[in-house]
Image (cartoon, rainbow, N blue to C red):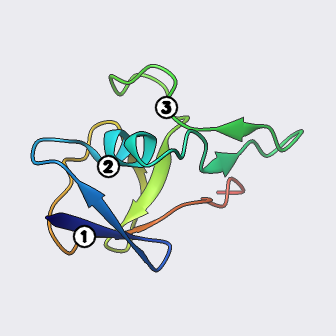
């Protein structure tokens, strides 16, 4: 089975899934919060128009999880710092 590493933990995914799809399939519907109010955010539009699903992928910050195809061994960090 294919796996990515999310916040230090292995997460299985199906070939062809995006990072967001793998997170949602694993039951994670929110993985960051808004700067004001700290409201939970995850996938909203699912097509890369909004910025609710931001993650860090292999050290590259601000990646939209709904657009990034999951790859074996990929390292994903959630809970982006919105102060940038």
Left or right, residue 48 beside residue 13: right
Q: Position of residue 31 (x, y in %)?
A: 59, 50
Residue closer to the observer: 57 or 72: 72
Label 3, label 1: how far apart the Cα atoms are: 19 Å
Question: Could you tell me which quadrant the C terminus lies in?
Answer: bottom right
Q: Is residue 9 visible?
A: yes
Q: Position of residue 81 (x, y in %)?
A: 66, 61
The label on residue 74 is 1
Seen from the viewer's position, the closer of residues 82 and 66 is 66
Separation of residues labelled 1 and 2 (CA atoms): 9 Å
Q: Report the residue marked by disc 2.
A: 19
Q: Which mark is residue 61?
A: none
Packing grade of label 3 (10 A; few <14, some 14-19, many >=20) is many
Specify whether residue 61 is in view. no
Task: Say above or below: 54 vs 46.
Answer: below
The residue positioned 60% from the left and 59% from the top of the image is 80
Q: Count the marks.
A: 3
Residue ID for mark 3 = 43
Q: Residue furthest front?
A: 1
Q: Are marks 2 and 3 in contact (CB under 8 Å)?
A: no
Q: Work out how far the residue at label 2 is from the one at label 3, CA to CA, in angstroms.
A: 10 Å
Disc 1 and disc 2 in contact, CB within 8 angstroms: yes
- Asked where in the image residue 45 lies, by quadrant, the reply is top left
For disc 1, the neighbor class at 10 Å (few under 14, some 14 to 19, many from 20) is some
């Amino acid at each position: 089975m294919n796996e990515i590493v999310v916040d230090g933990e292995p997460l299985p995914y199906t070939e062809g899934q995006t990072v967001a799809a793998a997170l949602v399939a694993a039951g994670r519907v929110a993985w960051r919060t808004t700067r004001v109010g700290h409201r939970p955010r995850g996938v909203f539009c699912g097509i890369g128009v909004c910025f609710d699903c931001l993650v860090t992928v292999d050290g590259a910050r601000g990646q939209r999880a709904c657009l990034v195809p999951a790859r074996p061994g990929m390292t994903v960090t959630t809970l982006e710092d919105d102060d940038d």
